[in-house]
Amino acid sequence: MPLLEDEMADKPYSDFRSDTVTRPTPEMRRAMAEAEVGDDVLGDDPTVQRLEDLAARTMGKEAGLFMPSGTMGNSVAVKAWTRELEEVIVEARAHIYNMESTSMTFVSRVTPRPLASKRGAMDPEEVERNVRQAAVHTPRTSLVCLENTHNNCSGTVLPLDNMKAVRAVADRHGLRVHLDGARIFNASTASGVPVKDYAAQADSVMFCLSKALSAPVGSMLVGPRDFIDYSRRLRKMLGGGMRQVGVLAAAGLIALRDMTGRLGDDHRRARALAEAIAPLPGVTLDPSDVETNIVLFTFKHPRLGAADLIRELKDRGVWALAVLGGVRLVTHKDVDDADVARAAAAFKEILA
């Protein structure tokens, strides 16, 4: 793919670090400036209420709650579904376990039990073998956490059948299921499975507005109404109760209504980038594993380490991240075909 120099001349860099770097659209900025607001802690911000209702209906749940971040949304969900001294089954590479600053142990005071998986999908039989009852030496298992798409497995889509099988295990043992659905719309776009079908396999779902959907701030937590009522109290306890937050919810409404239909472009660009760099020395990457918008690969090169590669890329105007022993690039609204071409050319110049 040739570098489109004319298109990139006025763009100093291409930012593939994450889809969190997206800028709000002009429509979002206008909506934020004109948002009807109230005091959300006092329960009278009408724009937040519209967003929470839309989020709940979109996922097929009773109620929704606007969160400042996905990490807070996951933290509140774990806290709401568990008690101290209990245990939570998680996938070993899950974001909630590896990349949320130990919130599970710090906030909820529960023990994570990480299980290995095949590209993010835990074996339901293995899940069942690890369900434990409270005893003098062991905690009670009370919650299973799933992730779709799975960030640290290169944005893989968790199969619906796998989710249903894990849900069945949870039901047999009286466990709750929480879904970290930060990029659930990417999963739906890639698989054709409606988000409601994924959400139906979980008691609660967190999904992000500020990643692929391009809102500047915010995530949503949805679930049963009594769960959301309690979660609202927990959000306040964690310092997440905000006042005239309708200025942010206004952008979230546009994100949820208007930004899900373009995600296929991100997936196409991620696959094109993966195909361009997979043959290069030091890169271990199967492009067929790139199902959505995340390109994640291991890197072992005789001359360069991962940090060196990141630095060399940045010198050429391509920003990426080193994560969990690999290198990650994420496509999103603010990178286009010219950015992909720039990244591919930079990789080839460094490694070929």
Image: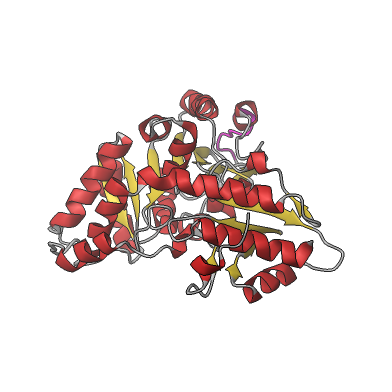
Residue 117 in the image: state x and y as whole percent. 66, 38
Q: What's the image's color scheme?
A: secondary structure
Foreground: 170 or 69?
Answer: 69
Residue farthest along the right direction in this orientation: 302
* Residue 203 quadrant: top left
Residue at 42 percent of width and 62 percent of height: 22
Residue 73 in the image: state x and y as whole percent. 39, 53
Foreground: 25 or 37?
Answer: 25
Is 185 above or below relative to 42? Answer: above
Image quadrant where one finds the C terminus: bottom right
Residue at 59 percent of width and 46 percent of height: 271
Membership of 130 in magenta stretch:
yes
Relative placement, left or right, of 177 versus 279 is left
Relative placement, left or right, of 296 versus 143 is right
Residue 322 in the image: state x and y as whole percent. 65, 64
Foreground: 333 or 17?
Answer: 333
Image quadrant where one finds the N terminus: bottom right
Residue at 60 percent of width and 65 percent of height: 320
Residue at 76 percent of width and 50 percent of height: 279
Q: Which residues are drawn in magenta?
A: 128-135
Residue 180 shows in this picture? no
Membership of 36 in magenta stretch:
no
Foreground: 30 or 327?
Answer: 30
Residue 312 in the image: state x and y as whole percent. 70, 72
Q: Main secondary structure of the magenta part?
A: loop
Q: How many marks?
A: 0
Relative placement, left or right, of 154 versus 201 is right
